[in-house]
Image (cartoon, rainbow, N blue to C red):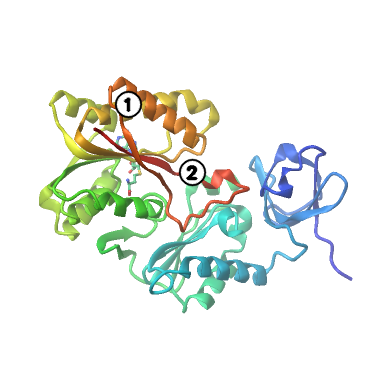
């Protein structure tokens, strides 16, 4: 006889899980007694099969649907999903799977709670849910089978682990190697210290925008505000920018930025200012500084919906100040990675800043996260990084 999985029954009228993978505690009518992080069958209020996911009573987002098909959540499913994630990134890429890429991006690859990045010869795995953390050994095995036994490093985030109630793992979980790895992003070199810094080490979501900026940096002075490890500045300087000023407040990020600039042989043309961007933009304005290209890539100002008004003021302020630093014909690359700030709202904020700066700006392009962070039509939250390339007259 087939073993019946514990079931999670949705409330009537709270059945968005038919098409969206997130189930919140308030959506749940009842759930059988189940070990935290274990698989459950999701049914609607009438008892009809909806899908399967891992249940965790601890966070408000208590279950994420992994499948809407009546199939087990087993290693075969994991292997299939990983296989199609790899196929998606390999398709159309000249040499097959890129050496530096996001291989698995959670919901967008049908594996909510799992992130896998490829940094040249090694893989970095991040588990963001208890369900995925419990699967970690199978994930490492499946990746090894699919990708020639590449060593795998775990780099969980403390915040997610705390929220979900598991021990964050940081270290090798398959094979081993040096804890620093050098990678090339379109020929620009970066050193990544495994398990340190933000995300899995680099902002891989900005890869395509780094390249765009490089395309117009030659001969210009560039301001890289919120530079982290100098992703934009390294690209701009390698592409022939005259000079780059980087602003960053984290000492660890500054040390890594300095190392990357030196590694690319462009350190002499770069200046790193250890400061709060809000203060430094004001100071640059006072001293009459001007730049041909300005990048604003701040952390998410709105982590919750209630933080939106304050976040909007923050975005407007940095954009207004950045616009005042632009040379005639200069370009501003401005971003928001806050889930709660929509494209329309971000554009409104930039429009207000441009009005205050009295600049009739042209939208050269609308920017987004790199294509290996795909967006799901039914999960608008997967489109989180938005940006504008604006040009002054
Ligand atoms: N542009 C980078 C990623 C930026 S991440 C890239 O392409 O790699 C945002 C960075 O802003 C982080 O490194 C963070 O330490 C820094 N930061 C956050 N608030 C800041 C502030 N008020 N002033 C200066 N830096 C800040």
Quadrant where the N terminus is found in the figure: bottom right
User: Which element type, helix, strand or loop, lies under badge 2?
Assistant: loop
Quadrant of the image where one finds ligand 1:
top left
Residue mark closest to the camera, 1 vs 2: 1
Question: Could you tell me which residue is drawn at 32 percent across and 35 percent down?
Answer: 362
Q: Which mark is residue 39?
A: none
Q: Residues within 10 Å of mark 2 (few under 14, many from 20)?
A: many
Residue 237 location in percent, x, y?
18, 52
Choose between 221 and 2: the one closer to the eye.
221
At x 38%, y 69%, the residue is 99
Who is closer to the viewer here, 144 or 378?
378
| Mark 1 or mark 2: whose residue is earlier in sequence | 1
The picture places residue 305, in percent across and down from the top left corner, at: 54, 30
Residue 64 shown left or right of residue 204 in the figure: right
What percent of the width, then of the height, locates residue 124? 44, 63
User: On the rendered structure, is 35 left or right of 46?
Assistant: left
Asked if 345 appears above or below 166 in the picture, the reply is above
Assess disc 1: are there few (<14), some (14-19) or many (≥20) residues with their C-alpha within 10 Å of its C-alpha. Answer: many
Q: Residue at x 41, y 52 (%)?
A: 205
Tell me what residue is drawn at x 67 percent, y 47 percent: 20
Q: Position of residue 361 (x, y in %)?
A: 31, 32
Q: Choose between 381 and 239: the one closer to the eye.
A: 239
Using the rendered view, name the quadrant where residue 152 is placed: bottom left
From this viewpoint, is residue 256 visible? no
Q: Pick whichever, 292 or 252, lies toward us.
A: 292
How many discs appear? 2
Say the numbered circle drawn on residue 384.
Answer: 2
Label 1 vs label 2: CA separation? 23 Å
Quadrant containing the C terminus in the rendered view: top left
Q: Specify whether residue 373 is in view.
A: yes
Q: Which mark is residue 354?
A: 1
């Amino acid at each position: 006889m087939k073993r019946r999985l514990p079931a999670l029954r949705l409330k009537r009228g709270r059945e968005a899980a038919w098409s969206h993978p997130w189930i919140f505690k308030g959506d749940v009518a009842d759930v059988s007694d189940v070990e935290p992080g274990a698989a459950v069958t999701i049914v609607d209020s009438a008892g009809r099969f909806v899908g399967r996911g891992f249940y965790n009573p601890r966070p408000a987002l208590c279950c994420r649907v992994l499948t809407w098909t009546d199939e087990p959540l087993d290693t075969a499913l994991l292997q299939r999903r990983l296989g199609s994630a790899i196929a998606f990134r390999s398709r159309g890429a000249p040499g097959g799977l890129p050496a530096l890429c996001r291989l698995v991006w959670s919901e967008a690859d049908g594996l909510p709670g799992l992130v896998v990045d490829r940094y040249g010869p090694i893989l970095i795995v991040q588990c963001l849910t208890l369900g995925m953390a419990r699967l970690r050994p199978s994930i490492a095995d499946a990746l090894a089978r699919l990708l020639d036994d590449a060593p795998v490093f775990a780099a969980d985030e403390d915040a997610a682990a705390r929220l979900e109630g598991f021990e964050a793992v940081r270290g090798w979980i398959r094979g081993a190697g040096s804890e620093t790895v050098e990678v090339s992003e379109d020929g620009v070199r970066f050193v990544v210290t495994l398990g340190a810094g933000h995300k899995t080490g680099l902002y891989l979501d900005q890869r395509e925008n780094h390249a765009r900026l490089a395309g117009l940096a030659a001969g210009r002075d560039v301001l890289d505000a919120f530079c982290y490890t100098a992703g934009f500045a390294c690209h701009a300087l390698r592409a022939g920018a005259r000079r780059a000023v980087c602003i960053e407040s984290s000492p660890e990020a500054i040390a890594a930025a300095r190392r990357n600039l030196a590694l690319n042989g462009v350190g002499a043309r770069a200046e790193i200012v250890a400061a709060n961007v809000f203060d430094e933009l004001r100071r640059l304005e006072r001293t009459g500084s001007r730049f041909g290209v300005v990048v604003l890539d701040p952390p998410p100002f709105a982590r919750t919906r209630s933080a939106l008004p304050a976040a909007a003021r923050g975005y407007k302020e940095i954009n207004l100040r950045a616009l005042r630093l632009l040379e005639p014909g200069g370009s501003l690359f401005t971003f928001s990675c806050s889930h709660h700030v929509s494209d329309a709202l971000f554009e409104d904020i930039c429009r207000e800043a441009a009005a205050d700066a009295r600049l009739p700006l042209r939208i050269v392009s609308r920017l987004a996260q790199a294509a290996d962070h795909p967006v799901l039509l039914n999960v608008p939250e997967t489109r989180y990084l938005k940006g504008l390339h604006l040009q002054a007259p």
